[in-house]
């Protein structure tokens, strides 16, 4: 069939789209125990799950798995939704679906996180999802910490622990030419190939100085002493220290 795209055996080209009034009516029937209405409600909101899993594209996860996990989140949203609250079902359902997928990704991450840390992160996500559904905005770290009765730092550590790892080669920007990767943004500017060869050249140049010149440079630039302090330690005048220091630096520049 032309235009047919299947995920977990579901033809996404034929997914239903329910109007808000239809959704609310099905929710009322579902809360009254109508299983057929519950089935229609799930089928009518599968496109909502599909839109959510598209946010997680590019992470190397199987789309079928994410779709099925998202459906679990959808079912939880249907079962827990309060029809007496003046909130659209999609507003409540999206955070629930996202939370379920995040928990799945967290529990199946290649980076192992302690059970206690995962439990804290799970509680943080529950509080966050509940607050988001009730207030339509993200809670602050302080609000989450206060709700759970734990220090602010524990909330931060728990959330950082379950953040998905990012490949160094993942592109972050492309303008028709070579893409800029994460590696380009976090590269070590101090330990480049050029800096490495400069250090080798400096080391070789230092070997050509005599012992007194090396000692003066070491006292001046590694220990941070003044020329007067160096002169007292080496046992020569400040003028001699200045002359030897200048001569040693010129020698290094020529050798490099």
Image: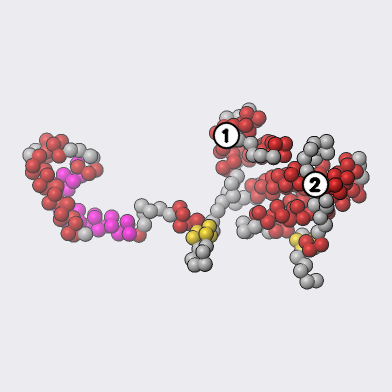
- For the record, the magenta segment spans 194-219
Residue 209: in magenta span: yes
Q: Earlier in the sequence, mark 1 or mark 2?
A: 2
- Spot occupied by residue 208 in the image (x, y as percentages of width and height): 16, 56
**Near-viewer residue (67 or 215):** 67
- Spot occupied by residue 213 in the image (x, y as percentages of width and height): 14, 48
Q: Are marks 1 and 2 in contact (CB under 8 Å)?
A: no
Of circles 1 and 2, which is in front?
Answer: 2
Which residue appears at 19% of the width and 42% of the height?
220
- Spot occupied by residue 30 in the image (x, y as percentages of width and height): 88, 43
Q: How is the image coloured?
A: secondary structure
Residue 107: in magenta span: no
Residue designated by label 2: 75
Which residue appears at 52% of the width and 59% of the height?
173
**Near-viewer residue (2 or 192):** 2
Residue 146 shown left or right of residue 249 in the figure? right
* Mark 2, secondary structure of its residue: helix
Q: Which of the image's four quarters has the N terminus?
A: bottom right
User: Can you say whether 3 is above or below 250 in the image?
Assistant: below
Please say whether residue 126 is visible from this viewpoint: no
- Spot occupied by residue 248 in the image (x, y as percentages of width and height): 14, 51
- Alpha carbon separation for disc pair 1 and 2: 30 Å
Residue at the bottom extreme, as displayed:
2
Residue designated by label 1: 154
Please say whether residue 186 is visible from this viewpoint: yes
User: Can you say whether 72 is above or below 7 in the image?
Assistant: above
């Amino acid at each position: 069939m032309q235009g047919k795209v299947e995920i977990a055996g579901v033809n996404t080209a034929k997914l239903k789209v329910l109007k808000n009034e239809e959704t609310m009516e099905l929710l009322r029937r579902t809360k009254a125990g109508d299983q057929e209405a519950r089935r229609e409600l799930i089928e009518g909101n599968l496109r909502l799950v599909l839109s959510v899993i598209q946010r997680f594209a590019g992470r190397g996860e199987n789309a079928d798995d994410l779709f099925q996990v998202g459906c679990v989140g959808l079912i939880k949203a249907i079962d827990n939704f309060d029809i007496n609250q003046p909130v659209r079902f999609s507003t409540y359902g999206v955070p629930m679906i996202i939370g379920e997928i995040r928990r799945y990704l967290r529990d199946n991450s290649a980076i192992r996180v302690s059970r206690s840390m995962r439990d804290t992160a799970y509680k943080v996500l529950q509080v966050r999802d509940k607050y988001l559904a009730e207030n339509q905005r993200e809670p602050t770290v302080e609000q989450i910490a206060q709700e759970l009765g734990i220090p602010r730092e524990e909330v931060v550590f728990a959330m950082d622990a379950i953040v998905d790892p990012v490949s160094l080669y993942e592109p972050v920007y492309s303008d028709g030419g070579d893409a800029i990767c994460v590696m380009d943004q976090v590269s070590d500017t101090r330990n480049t190939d050029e800096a490495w060869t400069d250090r080798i050249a400096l080391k070789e140049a230092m070997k050509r100085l005599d012992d007194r010149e090396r000692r003066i440079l070491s006292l001046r630039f590694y220990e941070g002493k003044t020329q007067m302090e160096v002169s007292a330690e080496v046992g020569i005048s400040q003028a001699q220290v200045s002359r030897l220091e200048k001569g040693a630096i010129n020698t290094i520049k020529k050798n490099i």
